[in-house]
Image (tube, rainbow, N blue to C red):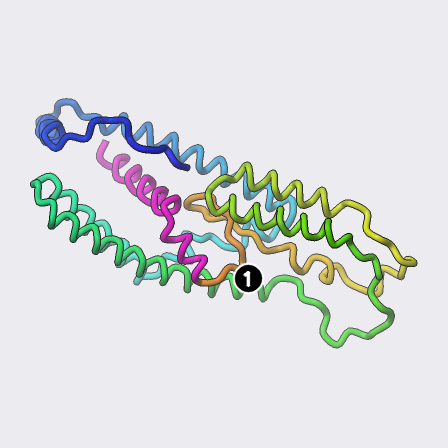
């Protein structure tokens, strides 16, 4: 979600006037802000629900496997989030007081804390994904070699198109474009159904569904921003997700909504 630059006039003097008026019980626009944020979060949650439904149709385990927000809420992460909030308040105060240099330094510290938090969150989620991968169906070990696997070979060009669609779905999911990502997944599924070159039919009992499904169960949905994540993502890629504008933006507005619901 990118709303573009704010069309409003940002004036320090107008801000001071507003804060003074609000302190006197006048011109309190917090209710309007709450309504705007609430609509944004409702739309995000709808996208998450649609994404989970889509994954549930493909792989029931994917929709319930991991709650990203819960997995990454270790005490150390909570403490870093607290420090970030305090630094943002500090930067806000410096801005209000016209201390530009001190505001810049405070914001630089915020970015350092966010990067540190993102790295730690990625490690925690990677550990959870490792456990998740271990629970996926695995090819049978030491299975009796009764017969070779069927020789049905997909057209290399079709397989390449499928891989491109799956990659596109992951990229779109990371950008929060859930509907577009789902469309790319549907296109990949349609390509998978195209007939392959068939050799003489073998007995289907000679191999298991795990041999076919082993690479299917890999997408998970971030329950904060709605981006798709893969259980095969590296820690660096997960850190980029946690430090990205989309994820950080939804963290901020969710926290702000909770704050407003207490105050208003």
37 vs 195, left or right, is left
Left or right of 82 on screen, residue 175:
right
State whether the magenta stretch is mostly helix, strand or loop: helix
Q: Position of residue 259 (x, y in %)?
A: 26, 39
Q: Which residue lies furthest to the front in this view?
A: 157
Q: Which of 73 and 152 is in front in this view?
A: 152
- Front residue (pair 92, 134): 92
Position of residue 104 in the picture relative to residue 38 (left or right): left
Per the image, the residue denoted by label 1 is 132
**Residue 145 percent location from the top left of the image:** 83, 74
Q: Give neighbour class at mark 1: few <14, some 14-19, many 20+ (Cα, 10 Å).
A: some
User: Up-down: is 51 above or below 111?
Assistant: above
Q: Quadrant of residue 201?
A: bottom right
Quadrant showing the C terminus: top left
User: Which residue sits at x=22%, y=35%?
Assistant: 263
Instruction: Give the x, y percent position of residue 218.
Output: 58, 55
Q: Residue at x 58, y 40 (%)?
A: 182
Q: Does the magenta stretch include residue 51?
A: no
Give, as a single range, the part of the protein colored magenta: 236-264
The kind of secondary structure element at disc 1 is: helix
Residue at position x 77%, y 73% in the image: 143
Work out which quarter of the rendered image holds the N terminus and state it. Answer: top left
Whole-percent x, y for residue 108 in the image: 21, 53
Q: Residue lying at the far bottom in this picture: please name it.
A: 142
Residue, far top: 27
Residue 246 within the magenta-colored segment of the rendering: yes
Is 211 located above or below residue 228 in the figure? below
């Amino acid at each position: 979600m990118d709303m573009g630059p704010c069309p409003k006039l940002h004036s320090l003097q107008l801000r001071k006037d507003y804060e003074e008026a609000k302190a006197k019980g006048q011109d309190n626009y917090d209710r309007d802000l709450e309504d705007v944020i609430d609509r944004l979060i409702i739309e995000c949650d709808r996208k998450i629900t649609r994404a989970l439904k889509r994954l549930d149709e493909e792989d029931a385990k994917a929709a319930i496997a991991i709650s990203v927000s819960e997995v990454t809420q270790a005490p150390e992460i909570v403490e870093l989030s607290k420090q970030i909030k305090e630094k943002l308040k500090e930067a806000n105060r410096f801005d209000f007081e016209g201390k530009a240099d001190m505001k810049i330094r405070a914001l630089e510290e915020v970015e350092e804390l966010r990067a540190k938090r993102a790295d730690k969150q990625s490690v925690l989620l990677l550990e959870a994904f490792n456990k998740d991968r271990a629970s996926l169906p695995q090819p049978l070990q030491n299975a009796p070699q009764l017969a070779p696997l069927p020789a049905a070979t997909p057209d290399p060009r079709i397989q390449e198109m499928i891989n491109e669609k799956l990659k596109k779905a992951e990229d779109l999911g990371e950008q929060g474009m859930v509907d577009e990502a789902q469309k790319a997944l549907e296109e990949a599924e349609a390509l998978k159904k195209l007939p392959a070159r068939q050799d003489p039919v073998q007995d289907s009992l000679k191999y298991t569904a795990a041999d076919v499904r082993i690479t299917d169960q890999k997408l998970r949905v971030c329950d904060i921003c709605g981006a798709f994540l893969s259980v095969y993502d590296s820690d660096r890629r997960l850190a980029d997700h946690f430090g990205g504008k989309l994820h950080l933006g939804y963290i901020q507005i969710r926290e702000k909504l909770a704050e407003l619901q207490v105050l208003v």
